[in-house]
Image: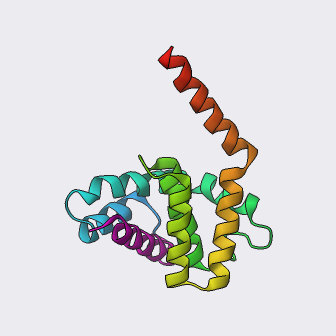
C-alpha cells in the first residue's frame, strides 16, 4: 500500500470509530490489524495511538483555531481528517507539516466538500502557525543545535 492509501484507510478507521463511539486503543488495534497488514501496521498504530492518547489535546487545538465550528458540531469526516493530519504531524515520524496538510486537503476534496477542504486548510494552517506551535519547534531546533556543539 502507498502512504496515500494508508492515510485513506486510517481516516476511514477514525471516522468509523468516532461514529460508533469506540475511539479507543483496543478497537484501533483490531481494525488496523484487519485493514493494514504487514509493515504498515507499526507506523499506523503509532499514529493512531498518538491521536487516541492525546484526543482531548488535539480536539482542544481544533476548537481553539476554528472560528465557527466546534468539534462536537463538525462533520465526522472533516474531524477524522483533521485529527489524522495532526496525528501525523505530532506523532508520526517523518511527515512534514505541509505534506500532512496537503494530504488532508486531498482527503477532504475526495470525501467531503470543497468548502470543507478550505475549512480544514484554514484550521490546520492556524494550528501549525500558532505561536505555541512555533515556540515548540524553535525549542526543538535549539535543543538539536545544542546537542551538535
Image quadrant holding the N terminus, namely bottom left
State the residue lying farthest toward the right: 67
Above or below, 128 relative to 12: above
State the residue lying farthest toward the left: 38
Stretch in magenta: 1-21
**Residue 132 falls in image quadrant:** top right
Whether residue 74 can be seen here: no
Whether residue 38 can be seen here: yes
Q: Residue 119, how many percent across, how many down? A: 69, 74
Q: Residue at x 57, y 32 (%)?
A: 140
Residue 86 among those drawn in magenta: no
Please give left or right for residue 27 compared with residue 89 in the image.
left
Above or below, 71 relative to 148: below
Above or below, 6 relative to 116: above
Q: Residue 89, how many percent across, how many down? A: 52, 52
Please give left or right for residue 126 compared with residue 30 in the image.
right
Above or below, 136 relative to 9: above
**Residue 75 falls in image quadrant:** bottom right
The coloring applied to the image is rainbow
Amino acid at each position: 500500500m502507498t502512504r496515500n492509501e494508508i492515510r485513506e484507510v486510517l481516516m476511514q478507521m477514525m471516522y468509523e470509530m468516532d461514529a460508533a463511539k469506540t475511539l479507543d486503543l483496543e478497537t484501533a488495534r483490531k481494525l488496523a490489524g484487519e485493514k493494514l497488514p504487514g509493515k504498515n501496521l507499526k507506523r499506523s498504530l503509532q499514529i493512531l495511538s498518538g491521536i487516541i492518547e492525546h484526543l482531548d489535546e488535539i480536539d482542544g487545538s481544533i476548537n481553539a483555531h476554528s472560528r465557527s465550528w466546534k468539534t462536537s458540531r463538525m462533520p465526522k469526516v472533516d474531524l477524522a481528517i483533521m485529527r489524522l493530519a495532526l496525528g501525523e504531524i505530532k506523532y508520526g515520524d517523518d511527515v512534514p507539516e505541509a505534506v500532512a496538510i496537503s494530504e488532508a486537503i486531498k482527503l477532504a476534496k475526495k470525501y467531503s466538500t470543497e468548502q470543507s477542504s478550505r475549512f480544514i486548510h484554514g484550521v490546520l494552517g492556524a494550528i501549525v502557525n500558532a505561536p505555541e506551535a512555533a515556540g515548540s519547534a524553535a525549542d526543538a531546533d535549539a535543543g538539536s543545535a545544542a546537542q551538535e556543539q
